[in-house]
Amino acid sequence: MDSIPDGFYFNEALGQIIEVRDLDGAQAQAYASLKLAREAAEYAPFAFNGVMYDAGQEDQRRIAGAMQLAMMAGMVNQPFSVDWSTHDNGTITLDGPSMLGLGQALGAAVEAVFARYRAAKDKVSAATTNVEADSVQF
């Protein structure tokens, strides 16, 4: 038999899986599933000017650092240029405005993920049955 999720057990006499979770338990499991999906989506590749870029934790730090360098160069009227690796392992040269745009695109992508997460969490919170809580998708 396949593994039985938390909050359920297999009743030998009935030959079926029985749920023993209450609504709070179902909501807690739903929140945990949503959080995992949000984390995966938060670090997924994103698009900027038709090109896909990586957005893992380290990538996000690198983008933030390069944005700071681009802003500092702009403040003293100096040119900025960086060769950036794309998601498909290509290379693209970004100037200051493009580097700032890449960071803005990353920020917008992450915010969209969190908006989806908040909306899904609200649906779980509003659930009045285990089936409703379990049916919420990210």
Image (cartoon, helix red, strand yellow):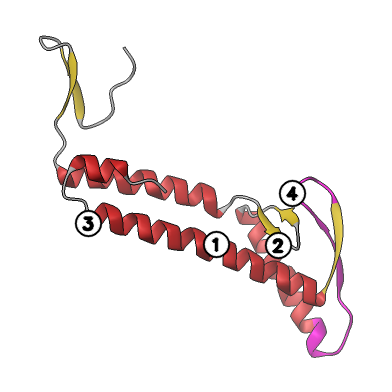
Mark 4 or mark 2, earlier in chain: 2
Kindly state the secondary structure of the residue where label 3 is placed: helix
Residue lying at the far left of the rendered structure? 13
Alpha carbon separation for disc pair 1 and 4 = 17 Å
Q: Which residue is mark 1?
A: 110
Q: Locate residue 75, reporting x and y percent.
A: 78, 89
Kindly state the secondary structure of the residue where label 4 is placed: loop
Q: Which residue is mark 4?
A: 87
Q: Which residue is mark 2?
A: 62
Which amino acid, by three-letter code, is at mark 4?
Answer: His
Disc 2 crowd rating (10 Å Cα; few below 14, some 14-19, many 20+) is some
Alpha carbon separation for disc pair 3 and 4 = 38 Å
Magenta region: which residues? 73-90
Which residue is at 59% across, 67% downward?
107
Q: Locate residue 77, reporting x and y percent.
A: 86, 89
Disc 4 crowd rating (10 Å Cα; few below 14, some 14-19, many 20+) is some
Closer to the eye: label 3 or 4: 3
Asked whether disc 4 touches disc 2, contact meaning CB atoms under 8 Å apart, the reply is no
Which amino acid, by three-letter code, is at mark 1?
Answer: Val
Asked whether disc 3 touches disc 2, contact meaning CB atoms under 8 Å apart, the reply is no
Asked whether disc 1 touches disc 4, contact meaning CB atoms under 8 Å apart, the reply is no
Closer to the eye: label 1 or 2: 1
Q: Which of the 4 quarters of the picture holds residue 95?
A: bottom right
Which amino acid, by three-letter code, is at mark 3?
Answer: Ala
Mark 1 or mark 2, earlier in chain: 2
Which residue is at 69% across, 52% downward?
54
Alpha carbon separation for disc pair 3 and 1 = 24 Å
Answer whether residue 85 is magenta in the image. Answer: yes
Q: Which residue is mark 3?
A: 126
